[in-house]
Structures are given as structure tokens and as C-alpha cells.
Image: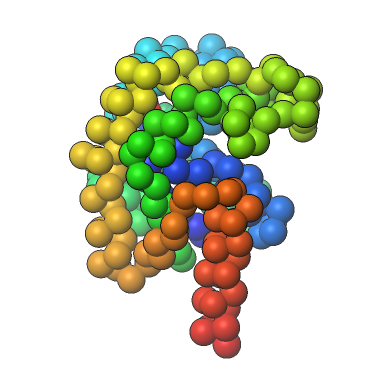
Amino acid sequence: MNLIFLGAPGAGKGTMADMAVQKLGIPHISTGDLFREAIKNETVLGKKVKDILASGALVPDDVTVAMVEERLAKPDAAKGWILDGFPRTTPQAEALSRIAKVDLVVEFGVRDEVVVGRLSTRRVCKACGKIYNVKTLPPKVEGVCDACGGEVYTRPDDREEAIRTRLSTYHAQTAPLIAWYGGKGLLASLEGEGDPKDVFARFEALLAARDAKAR
Ligand code: AMP
């Protein structure tokens, strides 16, 4: 199954995708993680996008689409994938439709003020990308990743000014994709606020309802 998780930064796409990987057995592909990995490894791509990510602006479409196309061609993506953070613009969605067939787009709806609150308390593992929140989902040992022992830190773009840029970019460039995918009959919208376990239960119910309908 080829899935897209859509929603504002901080809507919970990454957390839900991490949970869904175990249920569905398909990889979680986060373009933000891929860019951060490139920055960490100081690759040509990483050097090109470092300042863009820190500011909260979007990486140009051609660069992003090329990276996604390469990632989707890897063997582990043959059975399906969950795309998190891509597409973020209509040209990206159009490019994706030429590369692969999308089965379902799940939109996680969260109010802006909730997003700002979540992002300012979000922490991420520098090594494996696992997502934490100091208020709702802290690591067992402060600053240390439960999964890999890596350093749990605050992303440079989870600071106030970059959060505002990312939110306004989301509304201007990404939110139009809700109607775009809706028009293609691919969209399901879920309430994204509340405990992550409850949000995931809504996602599971959505999949179960789709399965029942397909039978
Ligand atoms: P995320 O981890 O999804 O919040 O992404 C972090 C940052 O990576 C974004 O603020 C952008 O700078 C960049 N980025 C991630 N995905 C995309 C995309 N699909 N198009 C353009 N830039 C992206």
C-alpha cells in the first residue's frame, strides 16, 4: 500500500508513521529525515539544503522530487511506503503521480496553536530520528533515545521564528493538496489532536473500514 501522511508540521505525521511501520511492514519515508541525514553526512545535497532547513523554508521542488524518486526505487519500497512530508506543493504531487500510484492520503488535522505548542516541546533523536515530546512522549532517560541510545535534541527549525515560517508555508503551499487529493477521491481526514495512541486508533479504524469495504 502506498500511503501519504499529510498535515502541518507537528501534526503528528512522523509519530503516526513510526507506529504504522510496525503494523503495515512498509517503510516510513520522511523527506525531512532524508535531508537531515544528508546534512549530517555533509553530502553535496546536505550542504545545498542546510540553510534552507534551518530557516523553515522549502527545498526547491526539483531537488526534492529527485531525492524521493531515488528513495522510492530502493528494494524496501517495492511493497509500499508511507510518505511523510512529501508532497508539500502541487508540482511535487504532480511529479509523484508520474512516479508512483498513491492508494490513500491521510490528513491529520490539528489547529495552529496546538502545532506551535507541540513543536516547541518536540525533541528528536539525532541518530535515528525517533520523535519525542518532553510533555507527552518523553524518552525514559532525559536526552537519550530509548531506541538507539542516540542524543535526543531540539531541531534547529523547532524554534519560534522557523515554526512560524513553516506554518505559513504549510497554509500557502501544502494545504491546497487537501482539496487536490480530495478531488481525486484519495483523501481521508482524521482528527489529529489528542493522545498519539488515540490518533493511531483512528487511523487503524480507517484502514479497517477500507478493508471491509473492499471485501
Ligand atoms: P519535516 O521534517 O517534514 O518538518 O521537514 C523539515 C524541513 O525539510 C522542511 O521545513 C523543509 O525545509 C524540508 N523539506 C522536507 N520535505 C520537503 C518537501 N517535500 N519539499 C520541500 N522541502 C522539504
**Residue 168 x %, y %:** 25, 33
Q: Is residue 171 above or below residue 117?
A: below
Whether residue 201 is visible, yes or no, is yes
* Ligand 1 location (quadrant): top left
**Residue 132 x %, y %:** 62, 32
Q: Residue at x 32, y 50 (%)?
A: 93
Q: Is residue 135 above or below residue 95?
A: above
Q: Residue at x 58, y 25 (%)?
A: 123
Q: Residue furthest left?
A: 172
Q: Is residue 51 above or below residue 193?
A: above
Of residue 42 and residue 128, the one placed in the foreground of this image is 128
Of residue 172 and residue 215, the one placed in the foreground of this image is 172
Whether residue 77 is visible, yes or no, is no
Q: In this rendering, would 126 be left or right of 169?
A: right
Q: Is residue 88 above or below residue 38?
A: below
Q: Residue at x 35, y 36 (%)?
A: 113
**Residue 1 x %, y %:** 56, 63
Quadrant (top left/top right/bottom left/bottom right) for the C terminus? bottom right
**Residue 160 x %, y %:** 37, 19
